Amino acid sequence: MTTISLTNVTVSSDANSHAQGWLTVQFSNGYSIQAYCPESSDNWAQGARQLCKPGHHDGLAPTQVDELLMQAADDGSYVVLQATLPKAAVPMTYARPADEHVYMELSHKQQSVFSADFLAIAAIIFGALYGLKWLFEKYLLPKL
């Protein structure tokens, strides 16, 4: 069996074919093929799960797909393995540290020079430079 990777295609289906698990894959040149969309519980197939979920009672509206991975069967049919949807189409929960989340959400806000992180780094650098100055005066200058 051959695995096919398609990029920038549109996927849709009407109510009857979607209920039976079939999708129409439309290419940019107007050509289209039918592909079987099995229900999958694999984590890597999340985009395909969103396309194939049986909750679309009216069918699947034309959906842009960045990359569609399919497998060609010997009888000429295709099976959808994986789909990569555009980021805006995929509902996701992002987990990141709270401070980083605030910085990313408020990217337009100017960061303060007197933040705790900046002052801690400045104190470490100042301490290291002062320690080098002290070592230089204590041990190297008397020998010169």
Image (cartoon, helix red, strand yellow):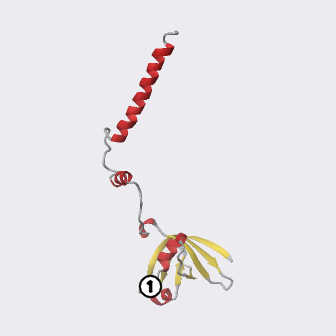
Above or below residue 77? Residue 141 is: above
Residue 54 at least partly seen: yes
Residue nearest the observer in this picture, 61 or 40 = 40
Return the residue at label 1.
59
Which residue is located at x 52 percent, y 82 percent? Answer: 23
Q: Amino acid at mark 1?
A: Gly
Q: Residue at x 45, y 65 (%)?
A: 87
Q: Is residue 3 left or right of residue 42?
A: right
Does residue 115 lie above or below 133 as drawn? below
Vertical arrangement, residue 142 with respect to residue 128, above or below: above
> Foreground residue, 60 or 39?
39
Q: Position of residue 125 (x, y in %)?
A: 42, 31
Among the 4 quarters of the image, the one containing residue 55: bottom left
Q: Position of residue 141 (x, y in %)?
A: 48, 12
Q: Residue at x 53, y 81 (%)?
A: 39
Left or right? Give the position of 139 relative to 96: right
Could you say which quadrant of the image residue 4 lies in? bottom right
